[in-house]
Structures are given as structure tokens and as C-alpha cells.
Image (cartoon, rainbow, N blue to C red):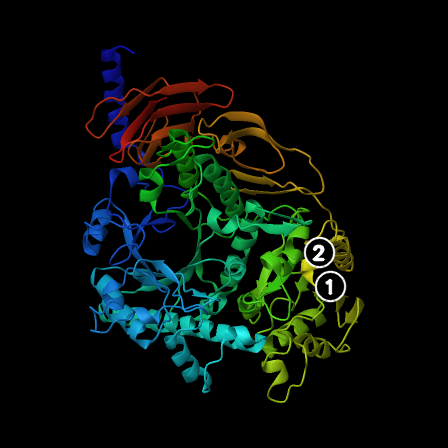
Amino acid sequence: MPKNILLTCLSILLTLIATAQEKKPENNTKEKTAFQTSSKWLPQIDVRADVAIVYGVNGNPSDHDKNSGFEERVRSWRERGYNAHFMTGIAWGSYQDYFLGKWDGENHLDEGQVEVDGDTIWHGHNVPYIVPQKSFVNYMKEQVIERVIDAGITSIYLEEPEFWARGGYSSAFKEEWKDFYDFEWRPQHTSPENTWLSNKLKYHLYYRTIDEVSRYAKKYGRKKGLDVKVYIPTHSLVNYSSWAIVSPEASLASLPGIDGYIAQVWTGTSREPTFYNGVLKERTFENAFLEYGSMVSMTAPTGRKIFFLTDPIEDRRKSWDDYKRNYQATFAAQLLYPQVNNYEVMPWPERIYTKPYSVAFTDKKVLIPQVYSTQMQVMINALNEMPASENLVSGENGIGVLMGNSLMFQRFPTHDSYDDPQFSNFYGQTLPLLKRGIPVQTVHMENLGYQESLKDIKVLIVSYSNMKPSSEEVHENLEKWVKNGGILVFTGRDEDPYQEVMEWWNQNGNKFQKPSENLFKMLGLAEDLNDGSYKVGEGRVFILRKDPKEFILKENQDKEFVETIETAFESLGKKLSFTNHLSLQRGPYKIIAVMDESVSDELYFAQGPVVDLFDPRLPVLSQKTVAPGEEAFLYDLEEVYKNNQPKIIATAARASNITWQENSFSFQCKSPENTMNSLRIFLPKAPKSIVLKNSEEETITPKGSSWDANSRTYYLNFENSPEGIQVFFQL
């Protein structure tokens, strides 16, 4: 384009923009998306989410900026327009001033979690996983909470309240045992009873810690005239149970000091190998779907806010190709929960953008490839616009699996030769259904007192093979639900060594040998039932006397279980159908996951016109084909055709200052330095001219640009800038 014409066009556009009305984004919220970082602001990590969660008063033990103080880091993000929040570990952290005696003159390294051989469980150098005694709680209040609130922080995240199941042998733990139980400590490995007692104490210690610290944060905030909110970033109950970690989990949702959670689900948790059909391997999508589901079950009935986390890489050193493949799987899984639309788009952008990782099938290590950073940024910027939806994921909804915090109590060590390899008693209830296209839900027994917990559940699967009911109230709620028309499927032999631990079903006048006996009695059934179907009020109970692990540890062993679920569903007058996929549309976005090891190897055909958001080139497709073992993330162009107004379909940058009128469309893009923007825009008609300018008002030449007349979309490709690139269309 000749220079004089370009300048004339630009002059006209600037005049138009000055009088145009700003078009506000559909989800105009300031705390919809977030990321956590131990670094001060850097141009390479300016990902433009709403919130920068600044990590640790002393940074992150494994990766932090030693040259910047906490207040400086907070200030650097605020100056760039971010809301600054704060996150710190509650079971570990850079608390060397506490551990090494600089705070109170006493060395506290002996308060770490200790294994049976006397070894401390470490998170880093001089950073043990801690037994949270009163002194540690006081330290957190005085040295951490007060300092961050004094810095003007009003949202605090107490990360990962974790006590390893293999811990429980330190002097600090023995002291807490004596105080809690009023009798001397017992080594957990000597009996199921002692294991149970040990893990209940671990649970209690972090419940107490979170309760006290969160209450104090709110109290201290009020003293400063601030409304402080407290969130818990935590792994899912599925993951903690699988990894043999004890955490308060669901019980925290009802604490008055807790405002919500971050569901810490990502490749590192979801790739944990599982058994299915006799094969042990990674099933990242399926595992992630169940993990996110358990977090929804934990929080939704309480009305607490929840953020879903994904990570474009993970803690373990893998190749960029591995990261990309698994990131797509977890990303698709999270979007299949349409009631959640708040996201932590990534942890540690400094790790993602500034550290080299392997190239598949080579010895080379490189920084994040531009094609991957572009794709990733398209995905995370879509989250800024992602609406909640009342649409349901495909497949028959309404089948749930009961779970509870006691899943974490039976994982370690093994007693009486009863084993539950890879948490198979849980996956035996879920994978046979999920693999057949049933979006199986999880239901937390701790939330059964909330009416919403079972509101949409038609068939509930219950097993006490790997957990136990937390109270008699659980059975009272189940009794009421069944008698009002619910269908309960109980599966389990009730032969694990934890059936007879000292608990409510055999205490205080109760004399049941197994908790299921109490449940069956409440339901008006014989206390020791065999396989069969039993009418109870308006509902029905099905009994299947096999432990759920038996359905998946060997090949082709889930037929009886699946047929029982089919029969249970048919008793409601409905027929269960199976597919090899899950799909959902939320606003203009289509999410599809096609599973392998399913009822067929059929391809899924998504009809267009759609834009492929997993492809950094953002192609417009008349049809998208999704094969087994793949996921898809698409933008449905039919949604924008309805309004026939300019619309940013996808961009690898955060778009703002969006302005349009009849003959012009403009906006600003910001994204990390050294990354490439890929941008597709719907326009009612072909543009007459396009101008790009940087923050210095210099004209930028795009790397690529094209008009697609069939879809009426324009594609642009140019280098990103954290300072912003202005884009002007004259129509």
C-alpha cells in the first residue's frame, strides 16, 4: 500500500475511533482468570489474565526471584494493571526463618513429617512437609498473613494442605496424637485401626490449621478495613487418594473463613496410570474429567467459588510434544463442566516461557516453540471469554458415584494382604461408564446435607471397599433419597480390613460389624444382603457383591457391573445408550473428546463452519474430524453470523479497547514478548484497509494476513508485545 494512502486511511480511522462506542466483552469481570508467579513482572511472562497471584512472602522454594522482595513483586504487577492476590503453601514453603529459628529463636526442622525409618519428607532444601502445630499456625498468622494484608492484599490462597499417608512418626505428630486422642501414640503400620486413627489426625491437623489461619486473615483484614477472602488451591480428592496424601478437602467448603478453591488438576496429576480392562497406562483425559468432577462435587452445593487450573507443562521433565498432547486433554476436560467459568490459566509463567525443555526424539532443549506458545495463548485467551452454560455434556446425565474424605485414609500401608492397586476401587466404579460415553458424576458424602448434592442424580453407585461413611447422617440422607425414588447400586464384598475399625457404626450403642449393615437396616433390608434388586419406598437398591477393582484389573470383567447399571437405569423407565465420546457446546465454543478403549473406534465429525482453536493457524473448517484418543476445541461461526457484527473469534493475545461502528473496527492486543499472535476476526464485509501500530506509534507489518470470503473472517499474524499492538480495520 502506498505511504500517502496508508496515512490517509489511518487519519480517517483515528477520527472514527474517537467517536465510536466501546463494545464491552461478554464476561466483563475482573477476577475471571488468574495465574500464579513467584517472579516480578517481566515482559516475557505478561500473559494478561485478570489476576496475578504473587507467590510467597519469600517466593517459591523451588523457583523464585531472589532479587525481589514481596512488596516489590506485588507493586510490579499492579503497575501493569493486574489485580494482585497472594498464594503460599500451608504445608510447606520458604519459611526458613521459622524452620531455622530466626523467628522465635527455636529450630523447628524437627516438626517435619517423618516416615517409619525416621526420614523427613522434604519439599526442598530446609523445607520439610510440616506437622502443623500451634507455633507454625502462629507464625503463619504473624509473619505471613499480617504482612500480605499490610501490603493491601485482599485475596489469600493457602495452597495444598497435605499430610503424606506414609508420614506420622515424628515427635511432633506423637505430641498431637496424645493431645487429640488422650492416649499414647500408636504406629500406623501395626494395624488397620492405627492407620485409620493416624490419618484422621492428619486430617484434623490441617482442618484446624486452615480454620484458624483463615479466621485470623478475615479478622485482621477487618481491623485494616479490608474484606479479605481466603481460597484453598488443592489437588482433587481423586488425586490425593491415588497418591496417598491426606487433606481436609470437602470439609473446608463449609468453613466460614473459606471463600472458594482452585482445582489443581493438570497433566502431572491426571497422567497417573490407571487400570482399565486389565491394562495399566496413562489415561489423561478420563482422569482429568473425573478430577475436575470431584472438585465440582466438593464445592458446587456450598456455593463457593472455584477456579479450574490447567498447566501447559508440568513438574516432570518431558518433551514439548508430550506437554502439548496432555495439555489439550486436560483443557478439554475442564471445559466439559459448563457451570464453571473461572480459571487459573497457568502456574509459573516464568517456568513456561523462560526455561528450556526437551524436543521429542532429540537430545536438544529449547525454549517454548512459537507454534506451541501461540496455540496456548489462543486457548487461555478464550478462557477470558468462556461463558458458563446451562447446556449438559452429551451422554446420559444423572449417574453418580459416592465418594468421601475417608478415601484418603485407607491408601497406605497395606494390611491383611488387601490391596487396592492404583486406586482401582474408585476407577472400577467410574471408568467402565466414562469409557462408554457416560459423563459419570461424583457426589461427596460430606455434602449430602445440601439438597443440591443429589438433586440431579438418578442412579448413585456406592461402595465401602475403599472408604467408609463419615457419620450416620450419611445413611440418613441416602435413606431419604432412595425412599423418594432414588436408585442406589451398592457394590462391594465388605471384606477389607477397615470394616471393623473403631468408628461410629460400632460405637455408642451401635454394634454393626460393617457400615453397610447400618445402611441396609435403615433402608428396611436385611443387614447382610446378597446380589439382587430390592424395592425400597419409591426407589430401589441393587446389590453387587464384588469389589469395584475386580471390574477393571483384568480384561473383560466389567460386563456384570455395566449391565447392573443399565438395569438400574431402566427401572426409571429410561434406556442407557453408549458412545465413544463426550461433547458440549457453551456459547460459541464446541468441546469434543473422543475416547479410545471404548464401544467403537468411530470418528467424530463436527460440522462447520468452525475455527480450530487447537491449531495455531486458526483455520476455518467445513468439518472437523476427531479420532479416538483426541480432543477438539472449536469456535462455531454460526453464532457470530446471527449478529453480523465485527467479532474477535480467537487471538493469541488479550484484546481490549474494542471499538466499532459501521465503517471501522479497532482494538489493542497485549501478550508476552517473543511470542507470535495469531488472530481471526469476523467482519460483515471485506476490509478496505488494515493498520497495525506499536506503542511507539510505529506502523507494523504483519507476518501474514488474508481475507476468507466464504467465512467472512480475516486472519492476521504478527509479533506480540506486552506494551500493546493497535489494530485498525476500515470497512
In the displayed structure, 644 sits above or below 391; it is: above
What mark, if any, has residue 546 been given in the picture? 1
Side of 626 relative to 368 (left or right): right
The kind of residue tagged 2 is Phe
Residue at 53%, 46% (x, y): give it: 333
Residue 558: where, in percent of width, then height? 73, 53
Side of 723 relative to 608 (left or right): left
- Furthest residue toward bottom: 509
Name which quarter of the figure residue 105 lies in. Answer: bottom left
Cα separation between marks 2 and 1? 8 Å
Residue at 26%, 15% (x, y): give it: 6
Name which quarter of the figure residue 182 lies in. Answer: bottom left
Among numbered discs 2 and 1, the one appearing first in the sequence? 1
What mark, if any, has residue 725 been given in the picture? none
Could you say which is closer to the camera, residue 58 or residue 263? 58
- Furthest residue toward top: 2
Q: Which residue is mark 2?
A: 551
Residue at 51%, 77% (x, y): give it: 197
Could you say which is closer to the camera, residue 485 or residue 125? 125
Q: Element at badge 1?
A: loop
Q: Do callouts 2 and 1 mark residues in contact (Cβ within 8 Å)?
A: yes
- Furthest residue toward front: 117
Quadrant occupied by the C terminus: top left
Quadrant occupied by the N terminus: top left
Residue 596: where, in percent of width, then height? 64, 40
The kind of residue tagged 1 is Lys
Residue 277: where, in percent of width, then height? 69, 49
Could you say which is closer to the camera, residue 663 or residue 390? 390
Side of 272 relative to 204 (left or right): right
Name which quarter of the figure residue 671 lies in. Answer: top left
Q: How many marks do you count on the picture?
A: 2
